[in-house]
Amino acid sequence: QVQLVESGGGLAQPGGSLRLSCEASRMISVINVMGWYRQAPGKQRELVARIPRGGDIDYVDSVKGRFTVSRDNAKNMVYLQMNSLKPDDTAVYYCNAQLHSWSPTNWGQGTQVTVSS
């Protein structure tokens, strides 16, 4: 099991930036895969970035070149730097983690991001 706590959401103007944080209860270096997801009102939850241990990070096409994931293993933190924000980025953003390939996926509580002028 991995407990996750997201933070950093808020209101941003179009073209602005926000950085989301995800704190894990375990060493992120041993977590098989983590991810950032988002769910906009009335829509299904969608993958934003998939973060495999020891592998390349995959981004959904709509955020490539604008969003960047980084990790701080010493702090057990994963970050999502969001630049050039658009109103379509408005959603609740979730961090998830699967400790092992056979483990259930754990989710954080989510953090609201609103992009509006």
Image (cartoon, helix red, strand yellow):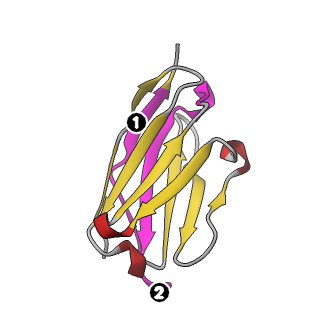
**Residue 14: image x %, image y %?**
58, 21
**Residue 22: image x %, image y %?**
36, 55
Label 1 secondary element: strand
Q: How many C-alpha atoms fall within 10 Å of the one at disc 2: few (<14), some, or many (≥20)?
A: few
Position of the N terminus by quadrant: bottom left
Q: Residue at x 31, y 59 (%)?
A: 23
Q: What residue type is labelled 1?
A: Gln
Residue matched to label 1: 112
Q: What residue type is labelled 2?
A: Trp
Viewer-nearest of discs 2 and 1: 1
- Residue range highlighted in magenta: 85-114
Residue matched to label 2: 102
Q: Is residue 83 magenta?
A: no
Q: In this view, does 77 lie to the left or right of 57?
A: left
Q: Residue at x 64, y 70 (%)?
A: 56
Q: Residue at x 31, y 71 (%)?
A: 2
Q: Looking at the image, which is closer to me, 1 or 58?
A: 58
Distance between the alpha carbons at the discs numbered 2 and 1: 30 Å
Tags 2 and 1 in contact by the CB under 8 Å rule? no
**Residue 70: image x %, image y %?**
49, 57
Label 2 secondary element: loop
Q: Residue at x 61, y 75 (%)?
A: 55
Which picture quadrant has residue 97?
bottom left
Q: Looking at the image, which is closer to me, 70 or 51?
A: 70
Q: Is residue 64 left or right of residue 17?
A: right
Whether residue 33 is visible, yes or no, is yes
Q: In this view, does 108 lie above or below 65?
A: below
Q: How many C-alpha atoms fall within 10 Å of the one at disc 1: few (<14), some, or many (≥20)?
A: some
**Residue 102: image x %, image y %?**
47, 86
